[in-house]
Amino acid sequence: MESILTILSREAGRAFEKAGLDAAFGKVTLSNRPDLCEYQCNGAMAAAKTYHRAPLAMAEEAVAALGESPVFADVQAVRPGFINLKVNGEFLADYLNRMQADEKLSVETVEKPKTIMIDYGGPNVAKPLHVGHLRSAVIGESIKRLGRFMGHTMIGDVHLGDWGLQMGLIITELKARQPELVYFKEGYEGDYPAEAPFTIGELEEIYPAASARSKEDPAYKEQAMEATHLLQQGHRGYNALWNHIMTVSVNDLKKNYEKLEVTFDLWKKESDAQPYIPEMVEYLKREGYARLDQGALVVDVREESDTKEIPPCMILKSDGASLYNTTDLATIMDRMKLYHPDEIIYVVDKRQSLYFTQVFRCAKKTHLVDEDTKLTFLGFGTMNGKDGKPFKTREGGVMRLEVLLNDIAEEMYKKIVDNRSIREEDAHKTARMVALSAIKYGDLSNQAAKDYVFDTERFTSFEGDTGPYILYTIVRIKSILSRFKENGGSTEAGQILEPLKDSEKALMLDLGGFNAAVQTAFEEKAPHRLCAYIYELANAFNHFYHETKILGEVDAGRRQSYIRLLVLARDVLETGIGLLGFSAPEKM
C-alpha cells in the first residue's frame, strides 16, 4: 500500500500542475502546527525561486485546484505561502479499512530488495555479556527486524572475539592450575576428552584472574602471548581446549541473547577469517596497495579532503602478527565471497569511529568490496548511570546483562503482584516481558549516537514514554476486545467509519502514519523514530479511550467501527513493538 503522505502528495502535485507549476512542489508533510492543520505543503515557498512569483499567489492557485479533490476536507493558503491541509474523514476511514486488510498493515515491500549484513554482537568468548553489550544487541536486532519487514534479506552476524590474547591467557592460567591435563602433554597423539575441563562459571573466573596477573607479571604475559601464537599455529592440544572454550561460551551466550530476544543468523568468529589473511596480505603487496613502515605493513587511507589526521591502516605488525584491522578486513573478504552483500552495517561504540574509517577506506581503496557495496558505521553512545558515568553495579563493577534483566524483572514482578491483576503463576512470565520492554524501549527510544542515562525508576514506570506504558496500552485494548467477545460480539465484522470526534480522527490519523514511520526508522537506521511514533499512537488511543464509551455506544454500527479501530490499533502497536524486539502479554 502507498502511504497516506504519498497519496496526499500526488493529489497536491496534480493541483500544482493545474496551476501551471511543477508537480514536484506538491510534496505534503505532517504538520508542524497540529493546532492549525493535519498536514502541510510548503511547495509554493520553494517554487518562488523557480518561478519568481509571490509564493502566496501560487499557493492560492494550488488551493483553488485542491478544492476539487475528494481527499481533503479543508485546504487553506496562509501567509507567506504555506498550504494547510485537513483530510476527508471518509477518505481516512477507507484508507484504514484497506490498511486493516493488508497483511503488512500498509508497509510496502521494497521494489528492489537488498542483501544487508549487520555486525551487532561482538562479545569476546569466555566473558559474560555485560551492559556494555546491550546497545549493539538491541539496536542491531531492531534494524534487522525493520529491514526484513520491508522485504530486504537481512543477515545478522554475532562476530565473536575468539582469536586474540584472551585465549592465550585462559590456556596459560589453566595450565598453571591443572598442569596434568592431557592438553599440555607434549607428543600426545590420542583423542582428547569430549567434556570440557571447566564450567562456564569457572571459565568466567579464569579469564579475569589471568588478565589481572598478566598486567603484573611480564613473564606470565609472555607465556600467554606464546600460547596464543601456538594456538594460531595449530597446536593440537591448545586447539582442543579452544574448541571446549568455544562450546561452553557460545552455549552460554546463546542462552543470554535468547533472554534478550536477540538472535543471529550467523555465529561467525574472528578465527573464521584467518584462512583469508595470507591471501589478502599477498594481494595487498602484489597490487602495490601496502607498504612497509618501520617494519609494519600498512595501507595509506588518508584523503586530500581530510581536516584531521587519518593514520595508515596497519595490516601486519613489524613482527608479522595480525591485528583487529587484519581480521576485520579478512572478515569483509569472507562476507563478500559467501554472501555478496549490498551493504554491511557495523553497530558498534561510536568511539571506534576513527578505526572503522580506516578499515572502510582500506576495503574500498584496495577493492576488497565492490564499488557499489556500502559500508556503514552506526556508532552508539554509552549507557550511563544517574551519575553520568558508564552503568555499574552498586559495588562499582561492570553489571552483567543477565543481572540487569533479573533485577528489573523482579522490580516489575513486585508492581504486578501489588496490582493483583493477574494470577500468581503468570506473574513471573509477565514480569520478564515487561522488564524486557523497559530495557529495550528505554534504550531504543534514545537516538543511537547519543549517550543516555539508564534510569531504572523511570524506565519501569507505567506512565510516560516507557516500554511498560506501551504494553499497558496494548493490554488495555486487548481487555476491551476480550470483554466485547465475551458478550457475544465479533471483532472481525464491520468497517471503520469516518470519525465523528476530534480524538477519534487523531487516532485514525496516527494509525495511518505507520507506513511512513517504519520506512523512516529503517532508512535512517533510527529505531528511536519508531519509538516516538508508537508513543504518540499510544497517547492518541488513550485520549480516545477516555473520551469515548466504546462498549457503551448505543449505535451498533458505530460501536462496531470502534471495535475495528481498536483491532487495528492493537495490531499496529504489537507489530511496532515486535520490530523493536519485544512483545506484549495478554494481561498485566
Image: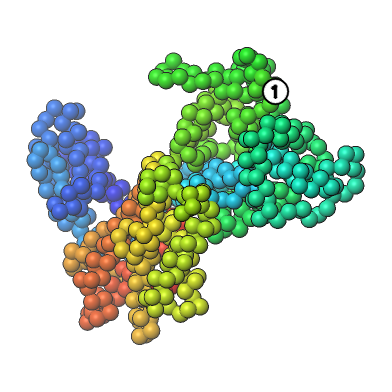
Q: Which x, y percent locates residue 383? A: 43, 47
Left or right placement of residue 541 versus residue 194 in this view: left
Seen from the viewer's position, the closer of residues 87 and 307 is 307
Quarter assignment of residue 541:
bottom left
Determine whether the residue tagged by mark 1 lies in a helix, strand or loop. loop
Q: Which x, y percent locates residue 510? A: 28, 58
Tag 1: amino acid: Gly
| Above-or-below relation of 509 to 177 | below
| Above-or-below relation of 424 to 458 | below
Seen from the viewer's position, the closer of residues 462 and 560 is 462
| Above-or-below relation of 369 to 33 | above
- Residue 168 appears in the picture as rendered: yes
Quarter assignment of residue 201:
bottom right
Quarter in which the N terminus is drawn: bottom left
Seen from the viewer's position, the closer of residues 499 and 444 is 444
| Residue farthest along the front direction in this orientation | 216
- Residue 279 appears in the picture as rendered: no
Seen from the viewer's position, the closer of residues 136 and 264 is 136
Q: Residue at x 34, y 80 (%)?
A: 484
Q: Residue at x 68, y 26 (%)?
A: 321
The colour style of the image is: rainbow
Quarter in which the C terminus is drawn: bottom left
Q: Residue at x 23, y 41 (%)?
A: 26
Q: Residue at x 31, y 47 (%)?
A: 6
Residue on which disc 1 sits: 320
| Residue farthest along the bottom direction in this orientation | 487
Left or right placement of residue 169 versus residue 559 in this view: right
Quarter assignment of residue 415:
bottom left
Q: Which x, y percent locates residue 505? A: 22, 62
